[in-house]
């Protein structure tokens, strides 16, 4: 059972992982924080909490050819599972075939967030179908994105490559899309165990954390728009390559998502 103390910080049992670094369990101590309940979930029930999450993206079918299927989203054993499969579903939109993947995003009417600390404990799937955690908002006035990670769990090039990015598609001051991708090589293969990944985002800086260590920091020049939270798996024919059918089905499993904002 996962518990939290009376100050709002979550308390985890001691866990041994592949990395020598300690697991992070809560935001950096130099600030006062309070939880964001609508973006926090221990996934301890038998089904997805529909008050917090969609089991699909209401405005997007997936990245072709992989179609987001609600059948690929499940909750069991205290975890959220997103699965990629080899299957052709009937009556799919043009361009979707061969593969199905999965998407979970927060209910838009419940929460959009600007700034905070967001921590996920997970194990990506062992497949070229991605495992990803990201924040996104597409509005008429502004369209931005923060990618905490996009991971392919197989292949010598990708199995320990941590892909981080930020995007501005348009804003009141930006008319042409730009992004700032960075890769970090982990000292472990992502699919071998659960690790703790986090994003710290404030008005001045954006930081990416892995197992309690900062692996990237970026001056926050443009990312001041309230964003929505997403977990998903996609097919990337031109990036990771299409999944090998022998690797599927494969599952991206999330033990928890915990979110905080600064109390002040």
Image (tube, rainbow, N blue to C red):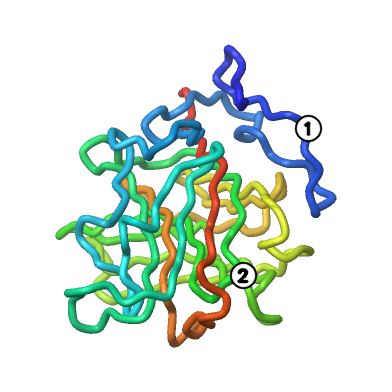
Of callouts 2 and 1, which one flags the residue occurring earlier in the amino acid sequence?
1
Q: x, y percentage for residue 188?
A: 76, 63
State the image quarter where residue 107 is shown. Answer: top left
The answer to whether residue 75 is left or right of residue 63 is: right
Q: Which residue is drawn at 81% across and 43% down?
A: 16
Q: How far apart are marks 2 and 1 (CA)?
A: 26 Å
Q: Which residue lies furthest to the right in this view?
A: 20
In terms of depth relative to the viewer, which is nearer, 28 or 229? 229
Residue picked out by circle 1: 14
Label 2, secondary structure: give it: loop
Residue 153's disc number: 2
Viewer-side residue, 100 vs 179: 100
Q: Can residue 198 be seen in this view?
A: yes
The residue drawn where x is 25% and y is 62% is 171
- Tell me the tag on residue 226: none
- For residue 113, which quarter of the picture? top left
In percent of width and height, residue 263 lies at 47, 23
Task: Using the image, determine if residue 162 lies above or below residue 133.
Answer: below
Name the element at disc 1.
loop
Provide residue 116's location: percent of width, then percent of height: 47, 38
């Amino acid at each position: 059972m996962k518990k939290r103390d009376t100050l709002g910080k979550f308390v985890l049992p001691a866990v041994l992982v592949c990395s020598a670094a300690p697991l992070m369990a809560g935001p950096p101590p130099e600030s006062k924080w309070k939880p964001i309940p609508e973006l926090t979930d221990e996934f301890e029930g038998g089904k997805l909490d529909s008050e917090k999450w969609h089991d699909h993206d209401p405005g997007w079918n997936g990245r072709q050819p992989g179609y987001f299927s609600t059948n690929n989203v499940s909750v069991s054993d205290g975890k959220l599972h997103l699965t990629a499969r080899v299957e052709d579903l009937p009556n799919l939109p043009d361009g979707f075939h061969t593969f199905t993947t999965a998407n979970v995003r927060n209910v838009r009417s419940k929460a959009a967030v600007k700034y905070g600390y967001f921590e996920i404990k997970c194990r990506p799937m062992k497949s070229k179908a991605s495992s990803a955690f990201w924040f996104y908002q597409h509005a008429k006035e502004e369209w931005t994105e923060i990618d905490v990670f996009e991971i392919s769990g197989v292949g010598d090039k990708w199995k320990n490559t941590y892909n981080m990015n930020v995007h501005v598609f348009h804003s009141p001051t930006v008319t042409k899309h730009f992004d700032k991708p960075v890769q970090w090589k982990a000292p472990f293969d992502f699919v071998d165990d659960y690790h703790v990944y986090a994003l710290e985002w404030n008005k001045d800086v954006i930081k990416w954390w892995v197992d309690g260590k900062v692996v990237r920091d970026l001056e926050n020049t443009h990312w001041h728009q309230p964003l929505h939270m997403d977990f998903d798996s996609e097919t990337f024919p031109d990036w990771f390559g299409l999944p090998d059918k022998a690797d599927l089905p494969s599952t991206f499993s999330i033990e928890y998502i915990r979110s905080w904002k600064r109390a002040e």
